[in-house]
Image: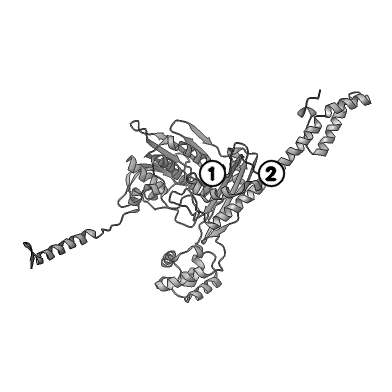
Amino acid sequence: MSIGRISYKTICVLVGRWCSLLSAASIESFKAISPSEFFYRNKELAGFSNPARALYQTVRELTENALDATDAHNILPEINIAIERSDSQNEDIYTVTVQDNGIGIPPHYVPQAFGMVLFSSKYTLRQTRGMFGLGAKMVVLYGQITVGKPVEVITSPIKSSRIYGFKLMIDIKNNEPIVIERSSWPKEGEWHGTMVKVSILGDWQRSKSKIIDYIRRTHIIAPYATIYFRDPEGKVYLFKRVTELIPKPPRKAKPHPIGVDLEMLKMMLATTRRKTLQEFLKNDFQGVGSITAERILRTAGLEGDRSPKRLSQEEIERLADAIKKYDGFRRPSADHLSSIGEEILKIGLNSMFKPEFVEAVTRKPTSYAGHAVIIETGIAYGGSVPMANDPTEILLLRFANKIPLLYDEGSDVSFKVISTMDWRDYEVEFPAPVAVLVHVCSTKVPYKGVGKESIADVPEIESEIRNGLREVARSLRNYLSKKKREEEVAKRAYSIIKYIPEISRSLSSIVGIKDGESIIGEKLLSMARAKLGIEIKSIKDVVIGVE
């Protein structure tokens, strides 16, 4: 059988080949990419979405690293930040330099610390400003993509007799550092710390206000630091240290059982040095003693003398389920957190705003999903605090692990809380000069994105923020109520005292005493002071006389 000149058999062969070609074309090709290549393709995930945001993010990431290298090790920070236009041919090329007096970086770690994405000293259960081991590497990567120059790193560890210099780039394909230049020389002075210098594509005019605000807010939360900043226009900003009080540095801690999921449990079992499951539960977790370990193992149907490394997948799942169901764990320890403290917060707010009233509170540690969290709140009223016409315009100073959060305020849980509070309950009448501070400390801050600019409304955290703000707002209410009463008393007092000269003059003429007007006036003023409880040195403070 044939159709025209082409046989049926030929048509079948051709159709078969065509289907084979279509099938081959529809097969997806798969390949892996390195972390460096992923963030090279998706740099906006880390906050480098445009030149203005990238310049701000660069200053922020390098400053955070500088502060972590100092105050986390009980060193009073001295941070120097400079932004310069580095290319006369292109005004959008900037060189950012950040120098600290911290602990420095061991030279054998420098290439990986700046040239390998997700390599970090922060992958421990301890509060740090950074979380992902990403910040400095993204700065290097962004500079490499936009300008093509290597990052310069100069460092000298504490007690080292030498200074080490590096010029580095990143092998994006393989996520490895490329060391272009390495040098070292004897150290003549006492300096220790790190200096990082990188050239990037930026936009100073659009990022100027954010960068200055970031540094200003950093000094509110860290008034124990001296921060020197020179901008591309040559203007110098100096934020001097106003206290030598420094927050307690965080300590490393073991994970809490509630915060451990199945995959983390598998990794812990595979890497533990403990010989038995009983020892593993007691020694590799916080808050687990012998009785708790026995109860968990009994629920999981596992013997305590079993080797942790020889459990089957099904047994690991039973153990994870038993941990999840157990409700007798103590709250997670907060030793690995570093709150600012009420006194330092008040010093910072006072230094920046010179308010007539300031209060701060550090809440007791709580937890969410097995992660310890400490909420700190503060409030400032008056002084140089800007006026707010309604709760949504209140100056909200948001911080997470001592990092100022400037972007995405409207989506942050703190904004939700202050916007829904009834400020009339606290004697605040808008427009009012009110500033509110919220600081969230945790090893697991629930950020809404890799850019780390807003915090999700986790119920436990939202509740703590609301209770903390209510606490400082009640103190403000007491102050405003007292102030209002004093003003009313003073108003009544002034309405009475202003007639003392006329009364004194009249009484003096009646009794005929020499200098009677002055004597009687002083007696009446003394009686008014005692009765009304006000401080007026002289009648002239109120009125010169009544004609």
Residue 516 is labelled as: none
- Residue 322 image offset from top left, x and y in percent: 49, 71
Q: Amino acid at mark 1?
A: Leu
- Residue 149 image offset from top left, x and y in percent: 33, 40
- Residue 464 image offset from top left, x and y in percent: 58, 55
Front residue of 350 and 205: 205
Does residue 228 appear in the picture of this structure? yes
Quadrant of the rendered structure where residue 505 is?
A: top right
Q: Which residue is mark 2?
A: 479
Work out which quarter of the rendered image holds the C terminus and state it: top right
- Residue 2 image offset from top left, x and y in percent: 7, 66
Q: Is residue 523 above or below residue 263?
A: above
Q: Dot 1: within a 10 Å radius of its alpha carbon, few (fewer than 14), some, or many (20 or more) residues?
A: many
SS at mark 2?
helix
In this rendering, position of residue 269 left or right of residue 19 = right
Q: Amino acid at mark 2?
A: Tyr
In this rendering, position of residue 541 left or right of residue 224 = right
Front residue of 395 and 437: 395
Q: Which residue is mark 1?
A: 76
Q: Is residue 233 above or below residue 266?
A: above
Total marks drawn? 2
Mark 2 or mark 1: whose residue is earlier in sequence: 1
Q: Is residue 233 above or below residue 57?
A: above
SS at mark 1?
loop
Residues at marks 2 and 1, CA–CA distance in whole angstroms: 34 Å
Residue placed furthest toward the front: 4
Residue placed furthest toward the right: 511
* Mark in front: 2 vs 1: 2
